Every structure is written in structure tokens, then in C-alpha cells.
Amino acid sequence: MSIEEALSMADKLELDLVEISPSADPPVCKITDYQKFLYHLKKKQKEAKAKTTKAVLKEIRFGPNTDDHDYNFKLKHAIKFLEEGAKVKAYVFFKGRSILFKEKGEILLLRLAQDLEEYGSVEQMPKLEGKRMIMHFASRKKKK
């Protein structure tokens, strides 16, 4: 069918000729109300956007001399975050001269990695960035 015939058919029906797939050979067109077509297109895009998962990053802060009770308290939070499907960023913050205890911070983060082994996987091993030693964990379970 030629373009002129399609346009005349659209005029008779008092609708618009909308090009659906311009890259196809021959191009695909549809006789429809253009505003209604745009509405449905936006609706489909909104639904697709709603289905995408958003990555949530939760942070847990430790000190180089974190006590066992505080460690266990923060460990429970990390487990809860990983079970919810979030990523966890655990870091040891070195204040003032406590930067001398880098080994303590690394041992603490590696202990955390060992305790979180069944809940999440390590994305990034402990790395010192300025006054922080950072480690990232990703959830093993997919969020429902």
C-alpha cells in the first residue's frame, strides 16, 4: 500500500497515520489516534521503569578498636541488610593517631567477611582510602 492511500484511509477514519517501526523494510505504520498512542507508549515505559530494581547501599561504620558486643550488634544489622537484598559497605574509620592500627581494621573487616559468608559475597576486599578502610558486600539472595 502506498503512503498516499494510507493517508487517505486515515483521513476517512479521522485518525492519524503513525509510524511504528521506521527501521523495518518496508516501514510499519498504524492508523490510530496519535494522543492515545503516546499515552500508551508512556504507560509502557513507566511500567518498565517500575519493574527495574534499584540497588540499595547500606553503610556500617566500625572503629579500629570496636568491642565484641558492638561488632555483634552491627553484624546483625549487616545480615538483615543482606537478607533484604541490599548491598553493604562496611568501613573502619581511623580517627587521629588510630591510623597506626591499620592491621586491626583489616582483621576486623576480614572477620566480618567470614561471618557474612553465607549471607553475601565480598565484592571488594579491604582497601584503605584516606582515613577509611572500605569493604563491599553483595547479597546472595535476590529481593522478591
Image: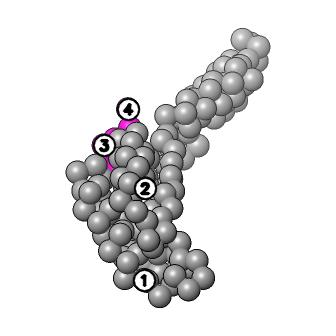
Tag 4: amino acid: Lys
The tag on residue 141 is 3
Earlier-in-chain disc, 3 versus 1: 1
Crowd rating for badge 3 (residues with CA inside 10 Å; few <14, some 14–19, many 20+): few
Check if mark 2's residue and mark 3's residue have beta carbons within 8 Å.
Answer: no
Identity of the amino acid at label 3?
Answer: Lys
Give the structural element (helix, strand or loop) at label 1: helix
Which residue is label 4 attached to? 144
Name the element at disc 3.
loop
Q: Are dots 3 and 1 in contact, CB under 8 Å? A: no
User: Which mark sits nearer the N-terminus, 2 or 1?
Assistant: 2
Q: Amino acid at mark 1?
A: Lys
Residue 70 — which label?
Answer: 2
Residue 16 in magenta stretch: no
The stretch of residues the image draws in magenta is 139-144
* Foreground label between 3 and 1: 1
| Cα–Cα span, label 2 and label 1 | 19 Å
At horizontal 53% and vertical 77% (from top left) the residue drawn is 94
In which quadrant of the rendered image does the C terminus lie?
Answer: top left
